[in-house]
Image (spheres, rainbow, N blue to C red):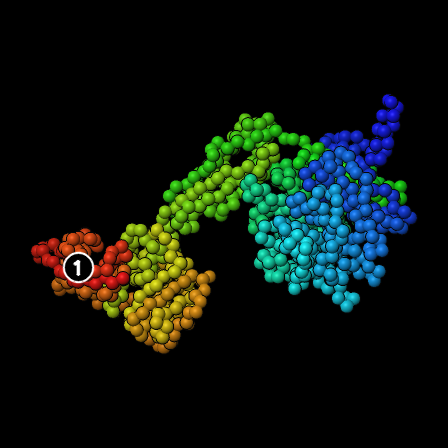
């Protein structure tokens, strides 16, 4: 019985073709190297392995050629790579599929795994097929045809949710075309080809990655107009029908970068949408074929990118792969001793803190004469998996090595449950601190700190915290508008719990807008760019009502002459991105919005209104303008009473008519100090309000011949006081006040002016009609 058990063990060890025992290197406990393939017959071989994981299930496929070659050879491990099932051929029908599949790619979509591949035909072309399994590789489907194009190469495939994409090179009339995208939105049941060619030539370096809401097309930019090829990401929201934007993530240094590989990972707990790209091209040493290996990572679906990390020790790498899972990033590449002449060795490296700090490099094939390349890499929960092709004893075969990740024992603990900012003015930055404690026994390496809302910032972005020590991170909050803002501050570290996130909450009840004027203290046309919560004034504030009138506060929508300081801070309770401004049949000074407004975004009511050009005032003279800017005032003349509707630049007013602007030689009135005689009123008066009837705002002017205590009060028809518009001491002059009756019912009201001074007490009354 004992001999029988020993014999079984020996047979098992021989079947795995074990080459060495466990070793510890680069933060990983590596197991023995095993051979997954069997020798191909004749001059054939086994090439281009690919790995994919679903939990503890590890999938491996490769390409085999030669007489009686296995069509799409496949092996599976269900115990994280400890043991492997025997090789299976996933393509059985040699009559319909006479040639071994090529250009294979794994796509893992939750519980379904796909293999997308090209199936050659005798004419020298191929068709794009896929097979799938819904039980983690136990049973595989028959081949399914995708778009039906004849093709020359199948470069890359990706999936997200129920969508699949593949980038390939179609053949039309025996000519290779620029690459296209084949896509399916129903799990592979139906496919379509993109109408547009991809913005890159048909090299074998094209990669695609589906992420939430985006198709990312990654390539070395040989059709990008830079000094040398760089790693470019084109992004589409409609599966390559149109392109949203383009991002260059490699340094534009003239040396060039190529051979991109991409990996993605979604973390639901903290909402991270991670994409990692690895390429060849950093630290060239003059070799044509190999160079330094670079990595760059984005945690927010490609919007922002972490700094570039060069992970190779010697700039002699090529044929590489990358994988990312939570806080762990693992890479592998073929290290080349001499340019294009070999030998090649398989190197790997791992980061436990999201790609900022890296463990040492492990050489899985340390024999100086080894000829191993085209490695592939994958991660499961606590294990790293690497496979490659290697020439041993004149035969190319597929070799595999698994490694147990060495657990780190720092612990990241937040000292507060969340961080909160209360009542911060919009446009103003406030600061607070997050305290992080390391309660573990190893050093805590914080590799990245991220905010998922641009209103919140964080500094520093990295930190090393010793066991039992604390680290302090400054959080900034800059509200852009009135309201409540919620975000997550996420810490990527080497803690087992990583990523860890803490909520950030901020509220803003007032708006802060800073305007810089070129020449402070001189006459300038100004306006208030926000809806004010308190009266806003400036030095020498003057409005225009067929003549200049001194004012003590500003009204939104009205323009003024003033002598402001160089920088004026406006505070309000709302951002104004649209407005209706009433104008008279005369020259008017109007205001603007919180954002710039193009003249083409202004409409007139009624549309037949005839207007002059819009004039600003700069450097002592009037200038026509095509845009109204925040905080500025502008002259415009109208031939009739009406309204101007203003909307922000990115808001299109549908069905609106263009302004009727007539250019002539007439210029606006000169500034107040240029020929305008200032007169002192000879009597106390309260002028009739305008407009009247009104809804809901009306204006009224009053004049004072002497300094006096002034009060203006509003009464309803029963004699009850309902509002006080002003109650203060005023010097001699002409003034204007307004009443906003938005909260009052339609009715007749009375405005009463009370003046108390050296000349005695005077009361003036006018009648107002509010109609809603």
Image position, residue 20 (x, y; %): 81, 32
At 60% from the left and 53% from the top, the residue drawn is 214
In the image, farthest residue toward the left: 760
Q: Can residue 280 be spotted in the picture?
A: no
Q: Quadrant of residue 274?
A: top right
At 62% from the left and 49% from the top, the residue drawn is 161
The quarter of the picture where the N terminus appears is top right
**Numbered disc total:** 1
Image position, residue 740 (x, y; %): 26, 57
Image position, residue 90 (x, y; %): 79, 48
Closer-to-camera residue (123/379): 123
Q: Quadrant of residue 585?
A: bottom left
Residue holding disc 1: 750
Closer-to-camera residue (382/508): 382
Image position of 662 with respect to 202: above or below: below
* Mark 1 Cα-neighbour bin, 10 Å: few <14, some 14–19, many ≥20: some
In the image, farthest residue toward the right: 42
Closer-to-camera residue (339/435): 435
The quarter of the picture where the C terminus appears is bottom left
Image position, residue 531 (x, y; %): 34, 55
Q: Can residue 146 be spotted in the picture?
A: yes
Image position of 691 with respect to 516: above or below: below
At 82% from the left and 59% from the top, the residue drawn is 121
At 76% from the left and 53% from the top, the residue drawn is 143
Determine whether the residue tagged by mark 1 lies in a helix, strand or loop: strand
Image position of 239 with respect to 276: above or below: below
300 lies left or right of 670:
right
């Amino acid at each position: 019985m004992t001999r029988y058990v020993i014999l079984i063990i020996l047979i098992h060890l021989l079947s795995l073709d074990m080459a060495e025992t466990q070793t510890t290197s680069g933060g990983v406990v590596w197991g023995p190297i095993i051979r997954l393939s069997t020798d191909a017959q004749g001059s054939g071989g086994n090439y281009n392995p690919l790995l994919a994981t679903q939990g503890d299930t590890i999938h491996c496929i490769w390409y085999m050629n030669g007489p009686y070659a296995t069509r799409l050879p496949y092996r599976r491990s269900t115990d994280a790579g400890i043991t492997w099932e025997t090789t299976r051929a996933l393509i059985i029908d040699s009559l319909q599929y006479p040639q071994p599949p090529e250009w294979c790619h794994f796509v893992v979509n939750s519980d379904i795994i796909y293999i997308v591949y090209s199936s050659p035909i005798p004419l020298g072309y191929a068709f794009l097929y896929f097979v799938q399994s819904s039980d983690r590789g136990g049973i595989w489907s028959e081949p399914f045809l995708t778009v039906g194009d004849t093709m020359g190469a199948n470069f890359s495939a990706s999936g997200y949710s129920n969508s699949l994409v593949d980038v390939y090179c179609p053949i039309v009339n025996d000519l290779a075309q620029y690459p296209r995208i084949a896509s399916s939105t129903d799990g592979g049941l139906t496919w379509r080809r993109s109408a547009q060619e991809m913005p890159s030539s048909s090299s074998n370096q094209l990669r695609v990655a589906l992420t939430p809401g985006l198709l990312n097309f990654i390539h070395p930019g040989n059709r990008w107009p830079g000094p040398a090829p760089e790693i470019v990401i084109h992004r589409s929201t409609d599966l390559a029908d149109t392109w949203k934007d383009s991002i260059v993530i490699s340094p534009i240094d003239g040396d060039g970068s190529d051979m991109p590989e991409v990996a993605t990972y979604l973390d639901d707990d903290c909402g991270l949408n991670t994409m990692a790209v690895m390429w060849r091209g950093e630290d060239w040493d003059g070799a044509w074929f190999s160079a330094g290996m670079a990595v760059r990572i984005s945690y927010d679906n490609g919007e922002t990118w972490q700094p570039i990390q060069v992970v190779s020790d010697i700039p002699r790498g090529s044929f590489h792969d990358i994988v990312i899972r939570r806080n762990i990033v693992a890479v592998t590449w073929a290290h080349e001793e001499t340019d294009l002449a070999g030998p090649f060795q398989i190197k790997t490296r791992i980061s436990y803190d999201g790609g900022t700090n890296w463990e040492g490099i492990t050489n899985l094939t340390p024999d100086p004469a080894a000829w191993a390349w085209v490695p592939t890499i994958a991660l499961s929960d606590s294990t790293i998996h690497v496979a490659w092709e290697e020439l041993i004893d004149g035969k190319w075969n597929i070799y595999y090595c698994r490694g147990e990740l060495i657990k780190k024992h720092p612990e990241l603990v937040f000292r507060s449950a969340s961080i909160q900012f209360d009542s911060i003015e919009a446009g103003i930055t406030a600061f607070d601190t997050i305290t992080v404690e390391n309660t573990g026994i190893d050093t805590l390496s914080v590799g990245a700190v991220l905010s998922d809302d641009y209103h919140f910032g964080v500094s520093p972005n990295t930190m090393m915290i010793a066991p039992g020590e604390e680290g302090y991170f400054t959080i900034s909050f800059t509200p852009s508008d009135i309201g409540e803002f919620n975000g997550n501050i996420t810490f990527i570290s080497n803690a087992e719990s990583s990523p860890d996130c803490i909520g950030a909450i901020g509220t803003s009840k007032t708006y802060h807008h800073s305007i810089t004027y070129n020449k402070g203290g001189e006459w300038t046309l100004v306006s208030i760019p926000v809806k004010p919560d308190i009266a806003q004034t400036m030095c020498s504030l003057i409005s225009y009502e067929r003549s200049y009138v001194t004012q003590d506060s500003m009204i939104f929508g009205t323009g003024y002459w003033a002598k402001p300081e160089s920088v004026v801070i406006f505070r309000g309770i709302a951002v104004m991105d649209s407005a209706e401004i009433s104008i008279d049949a005369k020259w008017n000074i109007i205001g603007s919005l919180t954002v710039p407004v193009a003249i083409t975004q202004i409409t007139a009511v009624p549309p037949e209104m005839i207007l002059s050009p819009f004039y600003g005032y700069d450097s002592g003279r009037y200038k026509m303008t095509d845009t109204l800017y925040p905080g500025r005032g502008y002259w415009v003349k109208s031939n009739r009473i009406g309204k101007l509707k203003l909307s922000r630049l990115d808001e299109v007013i549908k069905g609106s008519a263009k302004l009727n602007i007539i250019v002539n030689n007439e210029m606006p009135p000169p500034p107040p100090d240029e020929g305008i005689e200032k007169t002192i009123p000879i009597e106390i008066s309260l002028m009739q309000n305008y407009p009247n009837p009104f809804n809901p705002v009306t204006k009224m002017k009053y004049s004072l011949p002497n300094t006096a205590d002034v009060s203006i009060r509003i009464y309803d028809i029963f004699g009850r006081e309902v509002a006080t518009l002003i109650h203060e001491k005023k010097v001699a002059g002409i003034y204007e006040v307004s009443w906003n009756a938005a909260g009052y019912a339609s009715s007749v009201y009375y405005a009463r002016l009370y003046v108390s001074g050296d000349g005695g007490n005077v009361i003036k009354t006018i009648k107002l009609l509010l109609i809603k």
